[in-house]
Amino acid sequence: MAYSDKVVDHYNNPRNVGTLDKSLQEVGTGLVGAPECGDVMRLQIKVNPETQVIEEAKFKTFGCGSAIASSSLATEWIQGRTVEDALAIKNTDIVKELSLPPVKIHCSVLAEDAIRAAIGDWKKKNGVAETAPAATAEAK
Amino acid sequence: MLKVVNSAIPVACWSCSVKQDEAKLFCPSCSKIQPPPGADYYAVFGLEPKLNLDVAELETEFHRLSRKLHPDRFARASEHEKDWSLADTALLNDAYRALKDPIKRTEYLLQLSGAQIGEQNSGKDRRDPSRAPADLLEEVFDLNMQLEEMRMARASGESDPNLEKSLSEAKAKFEGLLNEVDTDLRTQWTAWDSGEESAQAAAQKSMIALLDRRRYLRNLVRDVTEVLGD
């Protein structure tokens, strides 16, 4: 199975690899994993407390090319968005953008989960109420 | 990999024509060798499909049947019987390999009962949070960080005794968890073997989750072992 050009590009030049200080109030951390393949993904966001805009996103993923590309793309997409806008990103958007084959769809699911986990962590830290969970419906 | 077909179809012996309810390696009436029965691996050994199994007994039976099926014993038999002795031996070997190993046996019986395990899993099951070893994520992530560091250090010819020590400790810890999983699996075996329907359903669910966790832990231990080079 060949990776799409976009996956290869993200894999070779991953955007926003790194770490944010998770003890900071404005930083949210999401750590997710897939038991079958052993992938682990950490995605962190730094949110502007006034505007709720994600000013910085960093990730570190141990996994296959598609998992790395999915999380790399996710950080690219959420930077500059408000947290509510970022929550609108669906795994299917990632699948489309990266032309992921069916066996790699779970990588995109992992990336979506990571975004949600990071935002959830930030909300918890900052006492922001969770929005209605309607947006978390299955979209595969 | 599974060769499970129509095990319950009555067959007649090619030699003495006596009908049998279940295909066997040898005809119970005239003792002539039979074509490979399309039976499940348990039936090859005449065993009940149970997870608790006496491996020593299985081995004895395997050796006994291997001798009886050995192609040398069919040197003067018909061409059919010669072919069957080879095919039956192959089936017997497959069955023995699948049943003697506790993990393979568990996977095999779960598959026989229609469960989808491991890589066959797809779709909605993946999002079932009970399948993800969430309790381990933090440690798994840290372990991966250390592995990466260690690989980089190795590549540049450096050694870092502290890192090595910490990886060895992690390896021991994950091996311990692996043992715990095996103990838990054995507990579920007994629940499964009780044959009681609701207990079996619950045990099946637990075993699938335990096998996932086991696979995950085993991969981690393998990665650490590889990097430590011992």
Image: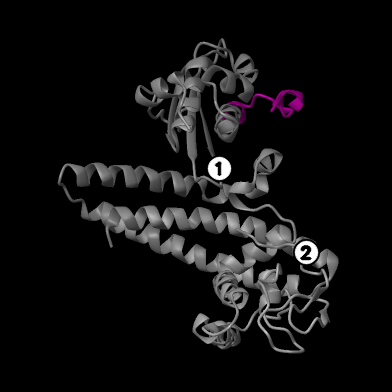
What numbered label is drawn on residue A72? none
Horizontally, residue B12 falls left or right of residue A40, namely: right
Q: Quadrant for residue A116, please give it.
A: top right
* Residue positioned 63% across, 62% down in the render: B107
Q: Residues within 10 Å of mark 1 (few under 14, many from 20)?
A: many
Q: Nearer the viewer, residue B61 or B213?
A: B61
Q: Secondary structure at mark 2?
A: loop
The range drawn in magenta is: A119-140
Tag count? 2
Above or below B17: residue A5: above
Q: The numbered mark 2 sits on a residue in which chain? A: B
Q: Chain of mark 1?
A: A
Residue identifier under label 2: B6
Residue B131 is a magenta residue: no
The answer to whether residue A60 is seen in the rendering is: yes
A130 in magenta:
yes
Say if A92 sits above or below B187 in the image: above
Is residue A48 at all visible to an observer of this figure? no
Tell me residue B30's x, y (percent). 73, 89
Residue type at the position of mark 2: Asn
Residues at marks 2 and 1, CA–CA distance in whole angstroms = 37 Å
Residue density around tag 2, few if under 14, some if 14–19, many if 20 or more, within 10 Å: few
Most extreme residue toward the left is: B157
Q: Is residue B142 left or right of residue B210?
A: left
Percent position of residue B177, x then y: 51, 63
Name the spot of residue A2 as percent of width and height, x first: 45, 29
